[in-house]
Image (cartoon, helix red, strand yellow):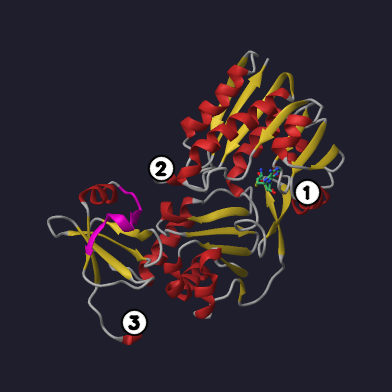
Amino acid sequence: MNGGETQTRLRLDLYPRAETAVRSGHPWVFADSVKSQNRPGTTGELAVMYDRKDRFLAVGLYDAESPIRVRIFHCGKPAAIGRGWWLEKARACLSRREGSALTDGTRLVNGESEGFPGIVADRYADTLVVKIYAAGWLPRWEEIEDVFREVFSPVHLVLRLSRNFTTMAAEMGIAEGFRGEAGEETVIFSENGIRFEAAVLHGQKTGFFLDQRDNRARVEMLSEGRDVLNVFSFTGGFSLYAARGGARSVTDLDISRHALDSAARNFSLNPSLAAVARHAVQADAFRWLEDAEGKYDLIITDPPSLAKRESEREGARCAYARLNAAAMRRLRTGGILVAASCSAHVSADEFLQAVETAARESGRPWRELWRSSHAPDHPAAFREAGYLKAVCLELG
Ligand code: SAH
């Protein structure tokens, strides 16, 4: 509590709709759902919520600045939140992942869906990268670090912070980067037998996109003898799997030279795959797909989030339709499109509709081969957590 003074527990009363949402397992309480509170709260303290009959409803992490005012830890009966609680939650994360021995790049903690709202932790070989998305964790960071070290036993631990509270963190003496013994800036790990680098200190998110692991394996199964175009290729994840699946050629298309260079290094890490005919194109994917010539047998489109906020949803739907229509025009007869979306604000249905509309408007016969979402180490316990969706179409 503040300044060592004993304050009364922060207590919130919610509007009935929010109460219902919390009871049904939704982990966020928005600022405009709070009907009243007994005193102003401080970011990082525990907030206890009561229902309209004045019974305990839930407890969570308070954030005085964020529109997500409380991130819920627990709903139901009163519970003591402390080191023992976090240890139990972290151990549960670990036991849910038992048996996935083929890869040492694993998401170990997936935020809200696993009881750590606003925290993800990814393991790359012996390095654990913890990314914090909610400022409320800062005052508790040492406790959480200690729990993660005890349960996940990493050799190295990297802390990454959301950009919007790095100043607040600095004021509290918390800096991004290696905690304790420093390791390498780039960690090599292995996913289903393919070696990749993860830029743990400076890469996007925690340094790699583990969520597409199973879709990459699906692409591998479809690649035999095909010319493959990986649009928004980032570090070449889909391309390496395509090469192992027997692709005739792979083309990486990304706007970032840095990303293309990383893909090239990943091929060098896997000498048995480096023999495939490989091309790299640095360009804006939307433009290049519209303007360039050349046809492919398998195209993957996995853009960055196209809707960062709700108001961008409609524009994103149109962008998905336009992007995938352009990709379809680059597909030969019998070609396959794997289209993915990581925009949480665009639902799976909306995304599928956008891609299907593009397929219908192509005037070609088409059929859906499969649809999918995240790899299983990214459990999604509520609607907004299910951000990743992918669909695979074959075009005649
Ligand atoms: N498919 C990747 C993840 C994609 S991340 C994987 O499975 O790992 C998004 C990528 O899109 C980034 O590498 C970024 O550099 C790239 N990007 C963003 N805007 C782009 C644009 N307009 N044209 C091409 N690439 C773009």
Sequence-first disc among 3 and 1: 3
Task: Report crowding for label 3: few under 14, some 14 to 19, many 20 or more residues within 10 A (C-alpha).
Answer: few
Check the image and report above or below for 15 versus 79. above
Q: Residue furthest left?
A: 53
The image quadrant where one finds the N terminus is bottom left
In front: mark 2 or mark 3? 3
From the viewer's perspective, tell me whether residue 323 is left or right of residue 348.
right
Write down the residue under mark 1.
Answer: 260
Q: Amino acid at mark 2?
A: Arg
Residue 26 inside the magenta-drawn segment: yes
Residue 9: x and y, percent?
Answer: 24, 73
**What's the distance in space between the residues labelled 3 and 1, CA to CA?**
48 Å
Q: Amino acid at mark 3?
A: Asn
Tell me which image quadrant ligand 1 sits in.
top right
Identified at 39% across, 63% down, the residue is: 88
From the viewer's perspective, tell me whether residue 118 is left or right of residue 4.
right
Q: Residue furthest bottom?
A: 4
**What's the distance in space between the residues labelled 1 and 2, CA to CA?**
33 Å
Question: Helix, strand, or loop for circle 1?
Answer: helix
Magenta range: 25-36
Q: Is residue 380 visible?
A: no
Q: Amino acid at mark 1?
A: Leu
Sequence-first disc among 2 and 3: 3
**What's the distance in space between the residues labelled 2 and 3, CA to CA?**
35 Å
Distance from mark 3 CB to nearest ligand 1 atom below 8 Å: no
Question: Helix, strand, or loop for circle 2?
Answer: helix
